[in-house]
Image (cartoon, rainbow, N blue to C red):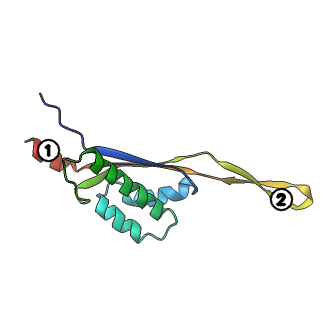
Amino acid sequence: MEQAEIFEARAIQKYLRIAPRKVRLVVDTVRGDNVEQALAKLSFTNKKAAPFVAKVIKSAAANLRDQHEEESFDDEDLVIKHIAVDEGPTLKRIQPAPMGRAHPIRKRTSHVTVVVGKKEEELESETD
């Protein structure tokens, strides 16, 4: 029995200097979309994280094209199978306060992971 070839690739952006909570707002809007539709949504999203998420999605699509050069993929053929935002290391700073005190400031970082693959219904039609 032949095993079907898996058309998936991933890209990871680490140490992104935006809080994960803010990046997740952007990521949730494109989860499950095809790549072309996701990039169109992100181009009109008015959030700081939008261009960074778009860059990671483009990178994952490019990784898939590089891994499978014999195949040709359009952006509408590719779908975001998994996209997640994890918390990275926190940079700890202080803000001077009155009477010799110091208030902590936590500058949070994010790790964005994107897995892009070929649409499922296309895979099923090719194997039949």
At label 2, the amino acid type is Pro
Q: Position of residue 67 (x, y in %)?
A: 28, 44
- Is 87 left, or right, of 83 in this rendering? right
Q: Is residue 92 left or right of residue 31?
A: right
Rendered location of residue 7, percent (x, y): 25, 44
Closer-to-camera residue (111/68): 68
Dot 1, crowdedness within 10 Å: few (<14), some or many (≥20)? few
Residue 55 picture quarter = bottom left
Q: Which mark is residue 96?
A: 2
**Outermost residue toward the left in this view:** 128
Which residue reaches farthest top?
1
Upstream in sequence: badge 1 or badge 2: 2
Residue positioned 31% across, 59% down in the render: 35
Where, quadrant-wise, is the N terminus in this rendering? top left
Residue 23: x and y in percent read 50, 57
Work out how far the residue at label 1 is from the one at label 2, CA to CA, in angstroms. 61 Å
User: In the rendering, at what x and y percent does residue 126 appear?
Assistant: 11, 45
Observer-nearest of 11 and 40: 11
The count of marks equals 2
Q: Amino acid at mark 1?
A: Glu
Which quadrant of the rendered structure holds the C terminus?
top left
Q: Secondary structure at mark 2?
A: strand
The residue that label 1 is drawn on is 124
